[in-house]
Image (spheres, helix red, strand yellow):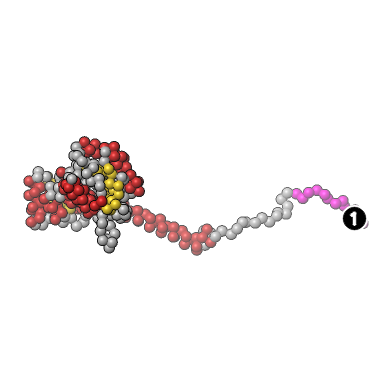
Amino acid sequence: MARANRKPDNKPPKKGGKRSLRGKGPTPKAEDRPYHKKYKSKEENQRKRTERKRIDAKRSDRKRDFRREPKDHVDTVAGRNAVVEALRAGIPAKELVVAVGVDIDERLNESIRLAQKMGIGIKEVERRQIENMTGIANHQGVALVVKPFQYSSQKEIFARASEPALFVAVDGVTDPRNIGAIARSAAAFGADGLLIPERRNASLTAAAWKTSAGAAARLPIAQITNLSRSIDDAKAFGCFVVGLDGDADTNIDEMEIADQPLYVIVGSEGKGLSRLVREKCDLLISIPMSSAVESLNASVAMSIALYAIDRKRSEL
């Protein structure tokens, strides 16, 4: 028997039938596949880097702890020669610190005698304490704790100035020994005071005091906030502002205002005066010297300038 012809079924196919193929996206990099050897190598390298950072940070902390100063800043002179010379120079000190069981020699004996004579306390401590206090391993078992320097104010210095006034200032002098030498020259040639900006300059540390050979006790010294503002104050006071500059066209011997109130500034040996300070100067002067020498030490340059000014003033 013949089958009846069926009508074509026009119904849409049921859901869940034949599925279309879908792509899985790009293949991950080898180091991003957990079971690949490069992934394990990447994890190991990351672990090593983390461990190395931890060790470096720990070492850095140890160095900081070793060199860290106490909460109250302590300025010290360490070593037998340095300590006895500081005491001979009369540096104001709070305490002489001597290591327990240290060998006594002539220098240490003299340091103890001078400290007793000056009424400075003497204390015995472990060598490690002196090392932590000074940040110096080779302290030779002795250190001198120096008192903080007592600065004057610029207002006081200006008020006590002679006629004609002579003020000395520094710009970017970071070596405390240079500061001490400048203070010594300023006192020797009758300057009315030394002005030291707080930023980018050394302060009156024990090293500066020692280099000044006691002049820091005789010369008013002020620590100023802003050198530019101090220059403006000096101009208002009636001073000519003179900057020492190796490239200046005017020779120091040609300076015609030596008999006027002066505010003399010296910069660092390398960079010299900063741009703003140079622009504020009324006169830039140079010191003649051999072409074989590029520049002078800041304290030497200031000494020569003050000598030239003093000589010109004495001739009037």
Residue 182 on the magenta segment: no
Can you identify the residue that label 1 sits on?
Answer: 3
State left or right for residue 98 relative to residue 173.
left
Q: Residue at x 8, y 53 (%)?
A: 109
Tell me which segment is drawn in magenta. 1-14
Q: Can residue 150 be seen in the rendering of this structure?
A: no
Q: Left or right: where does residue 110 sit relative to residue 258?
A: left
Judge by depth and name the residue closer to the eye, 256 or 87: 256
Task: Kindly give the residue lying farthest to the right in the view shown.
Answer: 1
Rendering coords of residue 258 (x, y %): 23, 46
Q: Where in the figure is residue 101, as x and y percent of width and height? A: 12, 54
Q: Quadrant of residue 227?
A: top left
In this view, which residue lies farthest toward the front?
Answer: 316
At x 17%, y 47%, the residue is 315
Residue depicted at x 50% and y 62%: 38
**In the image, what residue type sits under mark 1?**
Arg
Q: Nearest the camera: 226 or 94?
A: 226
Q: Is residue 291 above or below residue 157?
A: below
Q: Residue at x 35, y 53 (%)?
A: 57
Q: For the N terminus, give its image quadrant.
A: bottom right
Residue 54 picture location, percent across and down: 37, 54
Front-most of 217 and 266?
A: 266
